[in-house]
């Protein structure tokens, strides 16, 4: 497995001011309200690998995805992309593109498919002549399993899975090196999900793509991931190789998430239900943010926030100590 680092995220945070207007706060004596969507997140992504970020809705993973592609600047911390070495010995910044969650909302309904895919080629001036652009669009449609003749059709004429194939073709049109995939199959039927995931794996092998895969579906993550980070309330609570985490989850939250995956071998196994609601990121609980829902919580967990610790395999938990 390639050990070259493509992306380093160093203590990145993203906060949003959700306070009432100034006059309202003065009259009602309200304090400012800061939503801490992402808090001091650090990880590295290996080139050519799939790094997955997993967590419940509201944990900050989509905000983190937007930070990586540059749609949302970090409040604190850094995100550093390693430059690519070119054939002539020079270096260039990698191209980062996003595959969005909803293929019905991410494509312009007024544009033909050919124009949707050709737009980034024209904007980035990757191909000078229109004949070359048209040939490239046809090639990309064929690559993702569609017909070149589909370039003349509008998005409404396609199924959800076909629209997501168009979204993937549009991302590849930029000659992207890193694709941030924000739950790219969650809006699709299960059978179509498998087709899209298999397509993404094939394209990764063919073009050496690096994936940052955002999901709450651990069955999908198991199929796709090389490395894995578990997020809870804006922070990473466990990270390591996907094989390690699925075989031996250390954090109580990770264990609860994995317990939700159906098992063919033990369909009637005893499960510990996920209790309680995710706390508000505006007023997170003191200490470990997971302690109100954790059956193993100690008094220490209620007052002292655990740090990610370990070698390679990192866990933020006072109870489950890493090796």
Image: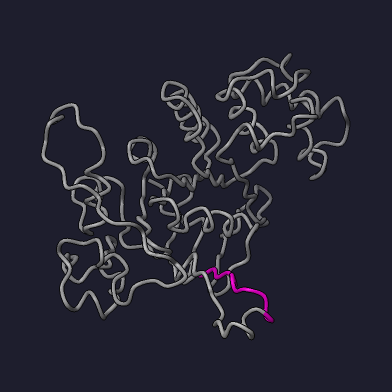
Q: Is 284 drawn above or below residue 259 in the view shown?
A: below
- Find residue 70 and report its image quarter: bottom right
* Magenta span contains residue 21: yes
Residue at image position (82%, 39%) is 122
Q: 172 or 273, which is in the foreground?
A: 273
Q: Is 12 drawn above or below residue 304 in the view shown?
A: above
How many numbered marks does the figure carry?
Answer: 0
Task: Give residue 274's position: percent from left, percent from top.
Answer: 25, 50
For this view, does 167 lie left or right of residue 316? right
Task: Give residue 285's position: percent from left, percent from top.
Answer: 34, 73
Task: Give residue 202's position: percent from left, percent from top.
Answer: 48, 28
- Quarter that holds the N terminus: top left
Residue at image position (22%, 74%) is 301
- Quarter that holds the C terminus: bottom left
- Find residue 258 and report its image quarter: top left
Residue at image position (29%, 71%) is 288
Residue at image position (53%, 31%) is 203
Q: Is 298 drawn above or below residue 247 in the view shown?
A: below
Magenta-colored span: 13-23
């Amino acid at each position: 497995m390639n050990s070259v680092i493509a992306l380093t995220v160093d203590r990145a945070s993203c906060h949003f001011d959700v306070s009432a207007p100034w006059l309202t706060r003065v009259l009602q004596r309200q304090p400012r309200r800061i939503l801490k969507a992402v808090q001091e997140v650090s990880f590295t992504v290996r080139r050519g690998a799939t790094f997955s970020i997993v967590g419940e809705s509201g944990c900050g993973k989509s905000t983190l995805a937007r930070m990586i592609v540059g749609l949302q600047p970090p409040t604190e911390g850094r995100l550093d992309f390693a430059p690519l070495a070119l054939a002539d010995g020079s270096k260039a910044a990698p191209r980062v593109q996003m595959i969005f969650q909803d293929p019905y909302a991410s494509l312009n309904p007024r544009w033909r498919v050919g124009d949707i895919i050709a737009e980034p080629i024209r904007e980035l001036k990757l191909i000078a002549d229109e004949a070359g652009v048209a040939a490239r669009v046809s090639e990309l449609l064929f690559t993702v399993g569609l017909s070149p003749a589909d370039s003349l059709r509008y998005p409404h004429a396609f199924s959800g899975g076909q629209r997501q194939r168009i979204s993937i073709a549009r991302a590849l049109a930029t000659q992207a090196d890193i694709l941030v995939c924000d739950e790219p199959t969650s809006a699709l039927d299960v059978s179509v999900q498998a087709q899209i995931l298999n397509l993404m794996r094939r394209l990764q092998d063919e073009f050496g793509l690096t994936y940052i895969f955002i999901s709450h579906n651990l069955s999908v993550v198991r199929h796709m991931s090389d490395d894995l980070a578990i997020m809870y309330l804006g922070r990473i609570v466990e990270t390591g190789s996907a094989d390690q985490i699925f075989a031996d989850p250390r954090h109580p939250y990770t264990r609860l998430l994995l317990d939700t995956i159906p098992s063919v071998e033990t369909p009637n196994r005893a499960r510990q239900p996920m209790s309680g609601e995710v706390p508000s990121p505006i007023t997170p609980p003191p200490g470990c943010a997971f302690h109100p829902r954790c059956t193993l919580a100690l008094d220490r967990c209620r007052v002292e926030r655990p740090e990610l610790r370990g070698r390679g395999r990192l866990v933020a938990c006072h109870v489950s100590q890493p090796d």
